[in-house]
Image: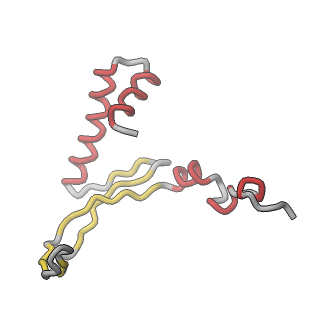
Amino acid sequence: MTKAELVEEVARVSELTKKHSEIIVNTVFDSIVEALRKDDKIELRGFGSFRIRQRRSRQGRNPKTGDKVDVPAKRIPYFKPGKELKELINGPGGAGAAATPASTGAPEP
């Protein structure tokens, strides 16, 4: 789903104009980015959490030339899905419980 499709979905569900929906979607994204810049953790119950992870500097290689390259330390945004989101995607028992013999094509015993 693209940002434009998300805006359309918000407009459809909330019965708002696309312009108002775009403002809402942009405000949510801007708020998440601003919180991460401040090293705040964002927790959306039932969905997941966003946080910043620190990566150490390291020695890398240029894939074209093979030369060693210094890769500086950096901050990386990280999303951890919540339990409810995982269950909505995989079913209550996880991926293994959702697959039945009929759905996998295996013969039933």
Quarter of the image with the C terminus is bottom right
Name the residue nearer the viewer: 17 or 71.
71
Whole-percent x, y for residue 27 in the image: 26, 35
Quarter of the image with the N terminus is top left
Residue at 62% over, 59% down:
95
Name the residue nearer the viewer: 108 or 58.
108
Residue at 14% over, 77% down:
65
From the viewer's perspective, tell me whether residue 58 is left or right of residue 90.
left
Residue at 58% over, 48% down:
88
Whole-percent x, y for residue 50 in the image: 34, 55
Residue at 24% over, 53% down:
36
Identify the colour scheme used. Answer: secondary structure
In the rendered image of this protein, does residue 19 appear above or below residue 101?
above
Name the residue nearer the viewer: 88 or 46.
88
In the rendered image of this protein, does residue 106 appear above or below residue 36?
below
Extreme right residue here?
Answer: 109
From the viewer's perspective, tell me whether residue 85 is left or right of residue 51.
right
Whole-percent x, y for residue 11 in the image: 39, 23
Whole-percent x, y for residue 83 in the image: 53, 56
